[in-house]
Structure formats: structure tokens, C-alpha cells
């Protein structure tokens, strides 16, 4: 019920660390009982920590944020939102659960309407209270109705009834904010919208949110090849929720992320796949998570968050390499604001989160995507400059790929289950080669295609290239 990290750093230092890492919005979780349960809503921060015997955390808050000690829990929440606003950071108020605790077991009583801690009328009252409380907070841009609906009570009919009622309650109390709907099955499934749309009294501000982790499909990432797992999970994402984009309905990937320690094999396989999809769809997204630690999680005091951007003491980045890749998809590929730029392709390399760009002497190297070359992919399979006739030409295996003007026969095909290998034929000998990267120089080379077959133990990601639609200004 109190934003994490306030025992480690001043509020303003945390807000500024968010900005310095290129993020512009915080999805700030809260529990309904903070607003509707008098025994909790009247608690001060100090008393709340005392009741949990969190002596060290309380001492840290006294050092770094003494002004919040005697505030009530909701006043402390307001103080965090206010400071984020002072640093020009948007906020989405996220109703994460009803009873405070760690989320999200299937049977924790917080999962679906009618569960022991999820009474619809209490929930709606909480939404009204929250919408009213932040009516004049200009940096509060959206309210997420409920995180990860789940459990045995899931029911489409009740979803429509209560989600629409909750949305109308928010709109009546605060007509300025976006209203964000989660799906079923821990925020993965919206297929029911294909047969029946949401019916609301207002338009223009309804958003849907989806979550996608490696553990959302752990059996696929642990048993299939990386190519096949990426293909299958991407298809599932589009089938269950991504189709909303095809209908031009706003979709926000409000949770995704990886273990920063690098020891979770499924996360390592998934990371390049989700980056490629985020670039391809130009998704808006929220990363789980900022926090490097928790005051108390599942009975463990000062629990470390290995998925967190920040270190456990909240002073540095936990993994700069992972963060740099994430930052590559912070900027839009298609807009808004780029309507006057001709559409073209970026060649995105998810393993590095860089894009292919032309260098002197017609050599191709990886570089920042917002400074990379604009390409077009022709029906003949040529990869050409957007404004010229030159195309990417294969060369001797292991040698740099260059641009040339004679493009006849230079056919690059998207092969493998992931469709991210760009393959050609070398010297008409039937030996297929793929684009790859010399990691020392970041120069684009050709190498024998690897991991095209379904080998679970083979890592294909150096040869993954995604042709991404873009309307960035190009070189």
C-alpha cells in the first residue's frame, strides 16, 4: 500500500531516475481496501510499518522521506503521484487487487468478481473514490480497472456487466482519464470481443491491456526451439489480443519483462522475440518493473526483485545491457507525429536492439534505430534503399555485406519458423546463407544459416532480423 523504495531513496530521486532512463509513465499499483476499508484507510505510513514489524524500512523512510511518515496510506500515494507530476511523468492508476498482498495466485480471493475479496460494489466504490481523488491531477492520464482477472469464477457475461459498470463509474467521476480494460486468463485473452463489443456512453478513451511474459507460455519456451517458441507465442498473442490492433482498437502491453540476472533460460529465449514484436507492432508498453526490492513480499523482508530496472538499493541500474535493449523500443517506430514521412522499413536486430544502417564504402553496420537507414522490401525479395536502386548483396561467407546496383537474383527470403532469418543463396551452389553480425565490429556479414531446424539447444538470435514498418525521418 506504500510505493516501494521510499526507504532506500528520496521520492524525487526515484522520479528523476525514471526520467533519466527514458521512461515517461508509471503504472502505479494500489489495493481497493486502501480506499474502502476504514481500518486500513485510516492507517498512517508509520503505523502500517510498525504493525508489520518492518523496523529497518521504517528507519530508512525516516531518513529519506520523513515527510510521509505521518501521512495516511492514501495521502502517501498522493504524494508519490504529485512528485511524479513535478517531474513530468504520467501516471496510470492500476487497481492491482483488493486485499493488500502479493499478486497473482489463481485462488487468492482477488481474482474475479464474486471472489471473497472481490465484491463488485466495493470495487466500484474504490474506483469512484480513486477517480475523484485524482480528478485535478493533470499527470494522471489513465485508470486500469483491474489487474489480471483470473481464477475459476471467470465469466464473460460478468466481465461485460461489471467492467462496463466500472468504466462508467470512472467516467462519471473523472471524464478526463483513459479507461483501461484487462482481459481474461491473467490478462491474455480478449477473443470474446470478436462477437460482442463493449457498450459505453463515451468514446475515444477506451484502451485494452495485455500481459506477455515467458512464463505466460513456459511449456513452449522450455520444450520448443527458440524459433518455434517465438512463432507459436507470437501467434497466440495475436489470436487472443493482438487482433485488436488489426481492428484499430488501442492495445497497451502493460506488463512484460525479463529476469535481469540472465540465468533464466526461458527469459533469455523470449527477450529477443518480445522486442521484435514490440518493434513490429509499435506497441505502447509498461515494463515490469521499476522496483529493485520490496519492503515485504510473500513473508520475505527486503525481497529483491530480479525483474526490476533498479538495483536492490535503488541507486543504479540492475543490468545496463538489458536496459539498453529495452530503451531501443521506448521511441515510436510509426508515430504519432510522423504522418508526413513516407513509410519504409527498418531492419531491426532484436539481439542487440539496433538497426541496420549504411556506412561509408557501402558497408552495413548496426546502429541506433532512430539514426538508421530506410529500406524497402520488394516483391522480388530485394532489400533496397528507400530512395535509391542500391540493394543488399550477399558476399563470401563471413565477409561484410555491401550495397550494389545489380540486384538481379539478390533474393532474400524470411525463413525459419520465426520468419526472422533473412536467407539467400550463395554462388548458386545451393548453400543457403543468412544475414548475421560480426559482434566485434557490429558489421553485417553472411554466415551459414543456423538453427533453422527445430533444435531446442541452438541459439538463432544473432541471425534474427525483423523488417519493421517505420515512418521515422530517414537517412
Image (spheres, rainbow, N blue to C red):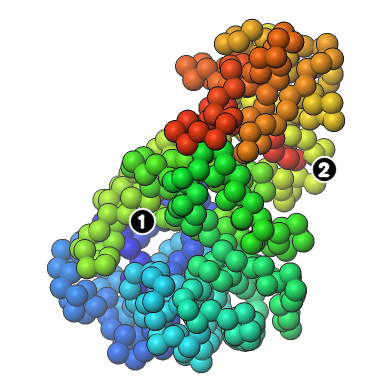
Number of marks present in the image shown = 2
The percent position of residue 97, horizontal first and vertical second, equals 43, 76
For the C terminus, which image quadrant? Answer: top right
The percent position of residue 40, horizontal first and vertical second, equals 31, 85
- Residue at the image point whose x is 63% and y is 38% from the top: 417
Q: Determine which quarter of the picture holds residue 204.
A: bottom right
- Look at mark 2 in the image and give the residue it sits on: 340
Does residue 118 appear in the picture of this structure?
A: yes
Residue in the foreground of this view, choosing between 81 and 200:
200
Does residue 213 appear in the picture of this structure?
A: no
Residue in the foreground of this view, choosing between 267 and 289:
267
Distance Cα–Cα, label 1 vs label 2: 39 Å
The percent position of residue 391, horizontal first and vertical second, equals 77, 18
Q: Secondary structure at mark 2?
A: loop
Q: Secondary structure at mark 1?
A: loop
Is residue 19 found left or right of 311 in the rendered image?
A: right
Residue in the foreground of this view, choosing between 303 and 381:
381
Q: Which mark is residue 134?
A: none
Q: Determine which quarter of the picture holds residue 394.
A: top right
Q: Between tags 1 and 2, which lies in front?
A: 1
- Residue at the image point whose x is 84% and y is 15% from the top: 408
- Residue at the image point whose x is 48% and y is 57% from the top: 216
- Residue at the image point whose x is 74% and y is 34% from the top: 345
Is residue 432 found left or right of 302 in the rendered image?
A: right
Above-or-below relation of 54 to 34: above
Above-or-below relation of 237 to 225: below
Residue in the foreground of this view, choosing between 129 and 386:
386
**Within 10 angstroms of label 2, few (less than 14), some, or many (20 or more) residues?**
few
The percent position of residue 175, horizontal first and vertical second, equals 65, 79
Q: Which mark is residue 291?
A: 1
Is residue 214 found left or right of 375 in the rendered image?
A: left
Amino acid at each position: 500500500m506504500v510505493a516501494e523504495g521510499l526507504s532506500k531513496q528520496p521520492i524525487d530521486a526515484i522520479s528523476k531516475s525514471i526520467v533519466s532512463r527514458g521512461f515517461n509513465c508509471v503504472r502505479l499499483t494500489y489495493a481497493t481496501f486502501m480506499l474502502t476499508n476504514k481500518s486500513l484507510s485510516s492507517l498512517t505510513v508509520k503505523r502500517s510499518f510498525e504493525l508489520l514489524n518492518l523496523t529497518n524500512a521504517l528507519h530508512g523512510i525516516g531518513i529519506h522521506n520523513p515527510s510521509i511518515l505521518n501521512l495516511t496510506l492514501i495521502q502517501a500515494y498522493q504524494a508519490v503521484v504529485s512528485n511524479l507530476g513535478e517531474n513530468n511523468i504520467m501516471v496510470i492508476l492500476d487497481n492491482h487487487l483488493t486485499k493488500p498482498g502479493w499478486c497473482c495466485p489463481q485462488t487468492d480471493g482477488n481474482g474475479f468478481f464474486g471472489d471473497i475479496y472481490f465484491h463488485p460494489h466495493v470495487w466500484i466504490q474504490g474506483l469512484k473514490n480513486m477517480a475523484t481523488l485524482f480528478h485535478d491531477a493533470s499527470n494522471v492520464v489513465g485508470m486500469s480497472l483491474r489487474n489480471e482477472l483470473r481464477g475459476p469464477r471467470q465469466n464473460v457475461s460478468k466481465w461485460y456487466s461489471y467492467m462496463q459498470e466500472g468504466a462508467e463509474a470512472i467516467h462519471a467521476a473523472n471524464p478526463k482519464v483513459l479507461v483501461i480494460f484487462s482481459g481474461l486468463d491473467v490478462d491474455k485473452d480478449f477473443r470474446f470481443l470478436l462477437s460482442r463489443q463493449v457498450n459505453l456512453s463515451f468514446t475515444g478513451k477506451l484502451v485494452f491491456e495485455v500481459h506477455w511474459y515467458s512464463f505466460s507460455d513456459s511449456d513452449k519456451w522450455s520444450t520448443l526451439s527458440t524459433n518455434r517458441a517465438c512463432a507459436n507465442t507470437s501467434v497466440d498473442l495475436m489470436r487472443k489480443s493482438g487482433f485488436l490492433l488489426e481492428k484499430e482498437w488501442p492495445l497497451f502491453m502493460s506488463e512484460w519483462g525479463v529476469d535481469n540476472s540472465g540465468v533464466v533460460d526461458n527469459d533469455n529465449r523470449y527477450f529477443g522475440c518480445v522486442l521484435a514484436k514490440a518493434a513490429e507492432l509499435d506497441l505502447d508498453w509498461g515494463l515490469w518493473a521499476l522496483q529493485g526490492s520490496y519492503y515485504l513480499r510473500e513473508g520475505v523482508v527486503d525481497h529483491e526483485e530480479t525483474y526490476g530496472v533498479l538495483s536492490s538499493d535503488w541507486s543504479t541500474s540492475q543490468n545496463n545491457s538489458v536496459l539498453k535493449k529495452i530503451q531501443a523500443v521506448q521511441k515510436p517506430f510509426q508515430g504519432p507525429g510522423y504522418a508526413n514521412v513516407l513509410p519504409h522499413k527498418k531492419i531491426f536486430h532484436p539481439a542487440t536492439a539496433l538497426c541496420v544502417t549504411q556506412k561509408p564504402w557501402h558497408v552495413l553496420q548496426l546502429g541506433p534505430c532512430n539514426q538508421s537507414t530506410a529500406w524497402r522490401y520488394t516483391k522480388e525479395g530485394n532489400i533496397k534503399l528507400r530512395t535509391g536502386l542500391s540493394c543488399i548483396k550477399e558476399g563470401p561467407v563471413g565477409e561484410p555485406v555491401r550495397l550494389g546496383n545489380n540486384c538481379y537474383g539478390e533474393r532474400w527470403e524470411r525463413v525459419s519458423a520465426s520468419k526472422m532469418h533473412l536467407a539467400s543463396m550463395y554462388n548458386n551452389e545451393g548453400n543457403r546463407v543468412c544475414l548475421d553480425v560480426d559482434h566485434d565490429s557490429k558489421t553485417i556479414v553472411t554466415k551459414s544459416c543456423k538453427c533453422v531446424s527445430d533444435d531446442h539447444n541452438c541459439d538463432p538470435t544473432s541471425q534474427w532480423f525483423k523488417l519493421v514498418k517505420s515512418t521515422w525521418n530517414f537517412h
